[in-house]
């Protein structure tokens, strides 16, 4: 597997967008981590916040693994980075869909979170397609 230099930058952009979304006051009750959100909209907002925080952490880990593989010029960390990126996409999608399913009010915080989730999902689809391509290419040469 090869490391592509654009993947790490996109992962860092998604990480920054997710950090912005978590700190942004554009949610239903202001900030998603405020007492009003966490207590008044229990269990919906805490679950959404947890999914977004986990997706943000996974995105940072995936970006660091991609950067580490480029700096050390090894492919040892790439597969782990792609698995962590997949987990970040799953948690981001789960958080946004859970929010829309239970609360359904669309404000700017959710739009930005949806955009970041779409970006990480696009990176994941690209990475999985790259894995499949390399597996099929190796099968042809073997």
Image (cartoon, rainbow, N blue to C red):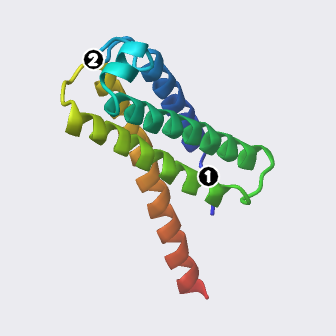
Q: Residue under circle 2?
A: 28
Residue located at (78% from left, 52% from top): 73
Looking at the picture, does residue 108 appear above or below residue 136? above
Which of the two residues, 85 or 73, is positioned nearer the viewer here? 85
The count of marks equals 2
Q: Quadrant of the N terminus?
A: bottom right
Q: Secondary structure at mark 2?
A: loop
Q: Residue under circle 1?
A: 81
Res. 33 visible in picture: yes
Instruction: Report x, y in % for residue 105.
Output: 19, 24
Instruction: Report x, y in % for residue 46.
Output: 41, 30
Q: Quadrant of the C terminus?
A: bottom right
Instruction: Report x, y in % for residue 26.
Output: 32, 14
* Mark 1: few/some/many CA within 10 Å (<14, 14-19, 20+): many
Which of the two residues, 74 or 117, is positioned nearer the viewer here? 117
Res. 2 visible in picture: no
């Amino acid at each position: 597997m090869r490391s592509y230099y654009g993947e790490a930058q996109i992962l860092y952009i998604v990480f920054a967008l997710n950090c912005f979304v978590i700190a942004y006051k554009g949610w239903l009750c202001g900030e998603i981590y405020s007492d009003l959100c966490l207590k008044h909209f229990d269990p919906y907002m805490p679950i959404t916040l947890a999914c977004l925080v986990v997706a943000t952490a996974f995105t940072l880990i995936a970006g660091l693994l991609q950067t580490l593989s480029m700096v050390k010029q090894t492919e040892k960390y790439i597969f782990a980075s792609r698995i962590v990126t997949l987990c970040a996409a799953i948690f981001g999608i789960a958080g946004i869909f859970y929010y829309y399913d239970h609360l359904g009010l669309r404000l700017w915080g959710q739009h930005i979170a949806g955009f970041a989730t779409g970006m990480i999902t696009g990176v994941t689809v690209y990475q999985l397609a790259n894995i499949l391509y390399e597996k099929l290419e190796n099968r042809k040469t073997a």
